[in-house]
Image: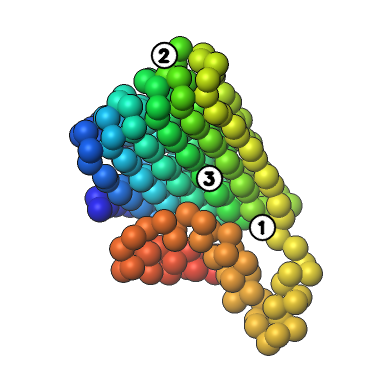
Amino acid sequence: MIIERTSKSVAVKQQLTIQEGQKVEYVILHDGEQAQFSRQFDVEKDAELKLITILLGGQQSDFDLEINLRGAGAIAKQYLLVMNNEQQITDARLATYHRVGQTTSSTVVRKVLDGQASGSLHGLIHIAPDAQLSDGELYDAVYLLSDAARNRSIPSLEINADDVKARHGSAQSKLKEEDLLYLQSRGIAYPQAKNILVDGFAARVYEQISDPDVKREVRELISHKVYA
């Protein structure tokens, strides 16, 4: 597993190639100030990339993640968690390109927005004309913890082949008073109840981390963010 940690403002573009037959788990963990970065991942024949990105705030975060599936049998599984509060802003652009046929991609996004925070997602699945028998999906879910929080999701498909599978979906929900009241009726204080609900929503992403110590660290950071 590769872990990339950022806590200060960065403006770096990097490229990584997953060689033929390799399996790589790559974790990006940002917890800090304003961030701006760009990453490109090229996945070769029969290789597999699991990319997990955790973005915990920053006054303004602007980032691009591009995945290129360049060989038959290439697989990319991408998971993104964004947590913003106060007036924090995140602008995410995720693009997956099926350059050849018989490639598979899956992208799962979770955004938790509180205070006057905002988050936007521009998600793209592109399937090239020669990329027959490819399969791509993109799902985005947002959890609004305040009425002032704002979300914008723009998923798109660019399909240039006819024997493929491609789909996208998005959902938005709000923190429900009845859920909080139910937990409080079981003796759980309001802050802990809110944390339980947020943790359950965010788990879809952080549970993909294979290292138990890193997973525990992320859970603690999420909890701190909720209580902030």
| Left or right: residue 128 compared with residue 197 | left
Q: Secondary structure at mark 3?
A: strand
Tell me residue 112's x, y (percent).
Answer: 58, 53
Residue 168 falls in image quadrant:
top right
Question: Which label sits on residue 202?
Answer: none
Residue shown at 37% from the left, 20% from the top: 100
Between the C-alphas of marks 2 and 3, the distance is: 28 Å
How many marks the image carries: the answer is 3
Circles 3 and 1 in contact, beta carbons < 8 Å:
no
Crowd tier of the residue under label 2, counting other residues whose Cα lies within 10 Å: few below 14, some 14–19, many 20 or above: some
- Kindly identify the amino acid type of the residue bearing the numbered disc 1: Leu
Residue at disc 1, secondary structure:
loop
Up-down relation of residue 24 to residue 38 (above or below): below
The residue sitting at 71% across, 52% down in the picture is 173
- The residue where tag 2 is placed is 130
Mark 2 and mark 3 lie on one chain; the one further toward the N terminus is 3
The mark closer to the camera, 1 or 2, is: 2
Choose the circle earlier in sequence order: 3 or 1: 3
Residue 81 in view of the camera: yes
In terms of sequence position, does the residue under pointer 1 or pointer 2 come before the other? 2
Q: Nearer the viewer, residue 222 or 123?
A: 123
Q: Amino acid at mark 2?
A: Asp
Q: Residue at x 50, y 49 (%)?
A: 82
Residue 120: percent from left, percent from top: 57, 37
x then y, percent, for residue 4 = 27, 49
In space, the residues marked 3 and 1 are separated at their CA atoms by 17 Å
Q: Identify the residue position indicated by label 1 in the image.
A: 145
The residue to which callout 3 is attached is 109
